[in-house]
Amino acid sequence: MSARENILARIRSANKTGKASDVIGGSAADRLTSSPISPIPDLTGNVTDRFKQRCEDAASTLDEVHQMEDVPKAVSRYLTEKELPMSLVCWPEFKNLSWSESNIQFESRGAIGDDKVGLTGSYCAVAETGTLVLLSGQDHHATTSLLPETHIAVVRRDRILKTMEEAWRLMRSEVGLLPRQVAFISGPSRTADIEMTLVYGAHGPFRVHVIVVDQ
Amino acid sequence: MEITSQDFKAVSSAKLKDEKLQKALFQAKDGFVVSRAKVVKELDNFEAIRQAASDVRDHCLAHLDEYLEAWESRAQAAGTIVHWAESYEELNAIVVKIAQDNRVKKIIKSKSMVGEETGLNEYVEGHGIEVKETDLGEYIIQQAGEHPSHIIAPATHKSKEDVSELFAKKHDRPRLEDAEKLTHEAREILRPHFLDADMGITGANFMIAETGSTVIVTNEGNGRMTTTMPRVHVAISSIEKCIPTLDDFALMMRLLPRSATGQVISNYVSMTTGPKRNEDLDGPGEFHVIILDVGRTRVLGSELREALRCIRCGACMNHCPVYQNVGGHAYGWVYPGPIGSVLTPAYNGLENAIDLPNAATLCNQCGVVCPVKIPLPDLMRKLREKQYEKNLKSKTEKWSLKVWAYVATRPKIYSMVTRVMARAGKIVGGNSGRIRKMIFAGQDWTKHRDLPSPRGRTFRDIYLNSKKINKG
């Protein structure tokens, strides 16, 4: 018998002899189809406000603009303020914005090791934890949010959801089969592995800047 | 990993005298315990969430075969190559085979406790393949040639000075003094490896049956790099990491980061379903998952099965007064602290970890903070009973317990003996009210502290007397 069969057989026999407590009950197939929601904490209040607060807690910075056309100006503001180079790599969905008006050099491609700033969109965001949800797939380079020292992400206001459960609900209805990677990003890369001292920029970006777009 | 839990007593004594370690443990304790308390308090229904998570884990274990099969078929449908391993050697051999089939020269690794169990790094390196740990803590440990002392903060026993010295030597660069500069030096050194490694190895915090996905939870971003940059990705996990649905995963994520590091969420939660798709711009061309069962099914069929609920947050060790004083290495295997005191004997045999179930005061701090309500003190008590049954206790201990049982179950004798002891204790204690040196089994107790001496009368005497007064 193969390792697989042996292991499954051992599980079955262990569950017969062992005291298998199961207050939830029902079969695995039931739960996989119904996917019941467990208790959720009280999250009353304005969703955007909570998202902003949580972003701040996670050391992300945040800006708000009215429309997509305002993004280059917001990016320029941010790069100037942080004294960062006025050039970036971005997802193709942003290539038609008026970057030259804001004096920003842009390239629509995945990031390589030396790129300093990466601009991505996001599938949605989770207010409970100040989290950006990025999906891999066509036109979505994973490297753009990973290799550069600064990650700027655009989020549409109506895509800021309360919880991770709501994000799954949206994905089940819109996406179907999950993409290769679902990345939940909450603030810049960090570590505290040396004497519990918090340091940003362990391997991923040093900074995460979120631009919320009204429409 | 070789087990050295038999040396628990000797190693603990040495660790207690290690001033550098004591300082590091004190710092870590403060960080973890205080920040966890803060984020737990933010939730209005933490206990309800905790109960739900515990129930989900139980349900999942009761149907583990079905969930693993569901996970496997969905993973395969997404193009994942699934392997099963019944021994450490088998898992290690599968990894090397995948590496050789893909002509892999360099592997980058995001931390995995299963990999620590199997001794994966040494095995792979033994086959001439380079392995780079990329989690900062794991990288430090690998450079120092040591093993992790904590499941989520592997280098917590190292001081900044240790790391300064180590990096200066290993990187052949000027010595840096602060944590930020040291971290960024490691970033600089590791970045090229991320870019040119052929294969990435990660653990998997969870496997999600609904979608056939694996998830890793990290703060540094090394996990995301490891699952994105190399052309082959291998995730190693064990059977009990399977959970039913994406919504169950959302539930676990309210507990895991809070309990582990006191964060609301970890910075990078990366969920992988299969290899690079046709439309994808990046990601590995091949994705393998190896599922291990060593010891797990045995525990599932035993009275210790609740231990399999564990989601590896480390809260039990962070809150354990024994761990807080001796650190993780004293436990002598992969998992330290209370969960280690249960898993180490359960996976490796009680006779190989005789002291671990006793390395606890049974104060239940671990049980109180466990996000999935594992009754850790009960499990340790069960192991202690087993030790007794299996004749694994020392003669002195068995003899003392027999005497105690004899006296405690005979009220008259008990009353007489305690009366004599209370009086004798008062005389020995004298004016100071302290006994400074005891004999026989008491020797060790008074080596480190005084025993407050009895006041001459037993509780029963005082109680009987007060009853008389009240009646009178």
Image (cartoon, rainbow, N blue to C red):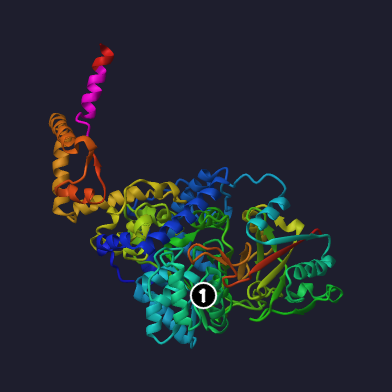
Magenta stretch: give its range.
B453-467
Q: Main secondary structure of the magenta part?
A: helix
Residue A20: give x, y in percent of width and height.
Answer: 38, 50
* Residue at the image position 68 percent from the left and 71 percent from the top: A150
Q: Nearer the viewer, residue B160 or B413?
A: B160
The chain under label 1 reads: B
Q: Secondary structure at mark 1?
A: loop
Q: Quadrant of the N terminus of chain A?
A: bottom left
Look at mark 1 in the image and give the residue it sits on.
Answer: B176
Residue B38: give x, y in percent of width and height.
Answer: 54, 49
Residue A203: give x, y in percent of width and height.
Answer: 57, 73
Residue B46: give x, y in percent of width and height.
Answer: 53, 45
Q: Nearer the viewer, residue A172 or B423?
A: B423
Please indicate, yes or no, whether residue A105 appears anywhere in the rendered image: yes
Q: Residue furthest front?
A: B431
> Is residue B460 shown in magenta?
yes
